[in-house]
Image (spheres, helix red, strand yellow):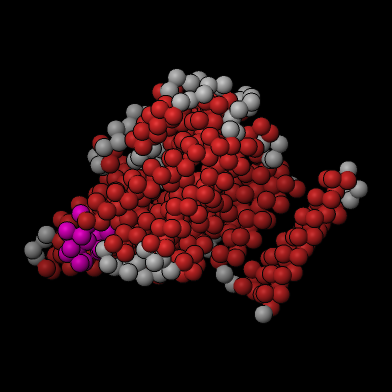
Amino acid sequence: MKTKRLLIATLSVLGLFASLLFINEQSGGFISPLFLVGLRWVALALAIWFAIEKRNLTAWILVAMFIGIALGSDFPEIAKPLKVLSDIFLRLIKTIIAPLLFSTLVVGIAGHSNIKQVGRMGLKSIVYFELVTTVALFIGLVSINLSQAGVGTNLVAQNSQIEKANTILSQKQSHDVILDIFPENIAKSVAENQILQIVVFSILFGIGLALVKNEEKRNAVLLFSEGLSEVMFKFTNIVMLFAPFAVGGAMAYSVASMGMGVLGNLLKLVATLYGALFAFVALVLVPIGFMVKLPFKRFLEAISEPVSIAFATASSEAALPKAMERLEQMGIPRKVVAFVLPTGYSFNLDGTTLYLSLASVFIAQASGIDLSIGQQIQMCLILMLTSKGVAGVRGASFLILVSTVSSIGLDPTKAFAILAVDALMDMGRTTVNVIGNCLATYVVAKWEGEV
């Protein structure tokens, strides 16, 4: 009851702040900015009190998000160095992923000795991923054609965007989508955080272990893997205690370094993307949930924490260990979660594929070029191939965007200007990536009769 009253008080003060801010802007600024800042921090103090009483990590993450926004807005010079908090968190998360995936997949495959199921899950997963991401591509196309966000937009990249773009492009390497699935050196795959290669190695290791005839030797490795799995989940719980600081630091840095002034003529692009992402969730993911009889309440409770982490840090990897743990707690078997969820991180990037089709047409519109339906479909076919298997590549979405724009005869430097709001858009598309992969895990588990 106390937490409910605190929540109502927090929302009331926030509502009052938003109303006064709007009135102040419309009336020429008769309210003291100092008073508005004070009111905002009163609301944040109430939110902190609410989180203390709630004793819930998700509540702390959401409160930290708002604190980060306030710090970035009111004290930008203090906020910018706080990025180190999110960097520390992401480094710790990356140390979890490889041993967690390895141990859970080995136990899932060798512990149940059901090698045929791995093949079935692989086939069903790929079919599902391809269908859903194709729909996402076309929703992106429809959205940008309806909004015409690029028409009349003057895409001029600032020096900071040009430098950032050149840094990303300088790291560009040729990628063979099929070849890059398979590891040449597992230590290298772990060092580079190549999730799909780690998954492939772990599956083959698990199958090899299942084929070992000597039960004593097989059980020894299996016991070690089970112990490693349990330890890594406990490790995840320890690291997650740092998540609110990481989220606050990430938001503070983003607001302080980006501000709201950079939106300018790209505001319509950002609004179109978020509208398209919402439409994708409402028109595609929710109906799929109904089709597989998804327990929506339990599902939302399970993914709330991973999704909030993904949104604030703009990193799908940051949400992976907690998403695996929460989906397993929801009742999905570990062997399904460990296989489908990380595989989806390479093949089922719904938010990213939607963004790529939308951004490509936006650049064409801003360049004054009217792409025909045929050209747009051709572009989608290119994206269906190029957007797969590059999740571990830094700046992958930008690299794909530049190559796609070039392939249809547009000036790739026009894409540089979009980097001004890329962080803001990355939050949205990463969130949808995580939601889509969590749902995919449940869908495959349902098809397998495991839930």
On screen, residue 170 versus residue 54, left or right, reads: left
Q: Is residue 144 in view from this perspective?
A: yes
Instruction: Return the residue nearer the eye: 374 or 406.
Output: 374
Residue 114 % position (x, y): 18, 63
**The N terminus lies in quadrant:** bottom right
Q: Residue at x 80, y 55 (%)?
A: 19
Q: At 38% across and 29% down in the image, what residue appears?
A: 378
Q: What segment is highlighted magenta in the picture?
A: 100-119
Residue 307 in the image: state x and y as whole percent.
Answer: 51, 57
Q: Name, please, the residue furthest toward the left.
A: 213
Q: Residue at horizontal 40%, vertical 58%?
A: 288
Q: Quadrant of the C terminus?
A: bottom left
Between 165 and 232, the residue placed more toward the observer is 165
The number of numbered discs placed on residues in the rendered structure image is: 0
Dominant secondary structure (helix, strand or loop) of the stretch shown in magenta: helix
State left or right for residue 131 relative to residue 286.
Answer: left
Q: x, y percentage for residue 48?
A: 68, 65
Visible residue check, residue 190: no
In the image, is residue 396 above or below residue 283? above
Which quadrant of the figure has residue 4?
Answer: bottom right
Quadrant hosting residue 154: top right
Q: Is residue 288 above or below residue 345?
A: below
Query: Most extreme residue toward the bottom, as rendered?
Result: 1
Residue 118 magenta: yes
330 above or below 252?
Answer: below
Tell whether 253 sits left or right of 190.
right
Q: Is residue 247 magenta?
A: no
Specify whether 122 is left or right of 439: left
Residue, x 48% and y 33% (percent of image)?
398
- Residue 236, percent across and down? 44, 62
